[in-house]
Image: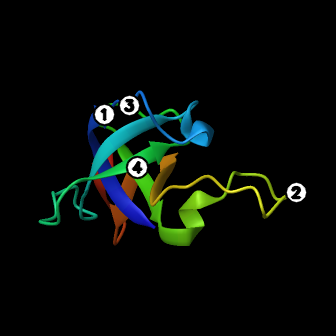
């Protein structure tokens, strides 16, 4: 799981039908001190209703493409990254490094 900041959005009028109901957001990985990492930004599918400038939790790879339903493992949504949580605060060694 990665800690990222939402820095923009992407609009795609033509895409896989299973992605039609999801927002595509551009995210940038950050450190636990909320500092931008040097890796480039990437697109993640928003599963939780995140917005611009929010700090979010992102999963990448095969774990990111589940449809949220345990009933059918066969039903998968094609994606490389998905936003699965919005961060309220981060603390390291009992000190807050980020607070919403």
Give me the C-alpha separation between circle 3 and circle 1: 9 Å
Q: Which mark is residue 90?
A: none
Q: Quadrant of the C terminus?
A: top left
The residue labelled by disc 1 is 9
- The reply to whether dot 3 and dot 2 touch (C-beta < 8 Å) is no
**Mark whose residue sits in front, 3 or 1:** 1
- Residue 13: where, in percent of width, then height? 41, 27
Say which residue appears at 24% left-offset and 64% top-offset.
31
Q: Residues within 10 Å of mark 1 (few under 14, many from 20)?
A: some
Say which residue appears at 40% left-offset and 49% top-offset.
44
Of labels 1 and 2, earlier in sequence is: 1
Residue at the extreme front of the image, as rendered: 14
Q: Which mark is residue 51?
A: 3
- Residue 69: where, in percent of width, then height? 78, 52
Q: Is residue 70 left or right of residue 91?
A: right
Q: Which mark is residue 71?
A: 2
Residue at the extreme right of the image, as rendered: 71
The residue labelled by disc 4 is 44
Of labels 3 and 2, earlier in sequence is: 3
Of labels 1 and 4, earlier in sequence is: 1
Looking at this view, is 36 or 82 the one in front? Answer: 82
- The reply to whether dot 4 and dot 3 touch (C-beta < 8 Å) is no
Looking at the rendered structure, the secondary structure element under dot 4 is: strand
Looking at this view, is 46 or 12 the one in front? Answer: 12
């Amino acid at each position: 799981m990665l800690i990222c900041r939402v820095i923009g959005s992407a609009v795609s009028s033509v895409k896989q039908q299973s992605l039609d109901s999801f927002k595509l957001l551009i995210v940038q990985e950050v450190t636990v001190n909320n500092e931008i990492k040097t890796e480039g930004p990437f697109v993640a599918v928003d599963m939780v209703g995140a917005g611009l400038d929010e700090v979010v939790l992102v999963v990448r790879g095969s774990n990111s493409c589940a449809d949220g339903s345990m009933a059918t493992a066969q039903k998968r949504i094609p994606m490389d990254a998905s936003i699965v949580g919005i961060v309220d605060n981060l603390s390291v060694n009992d000190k807050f490094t980020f607070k919403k």
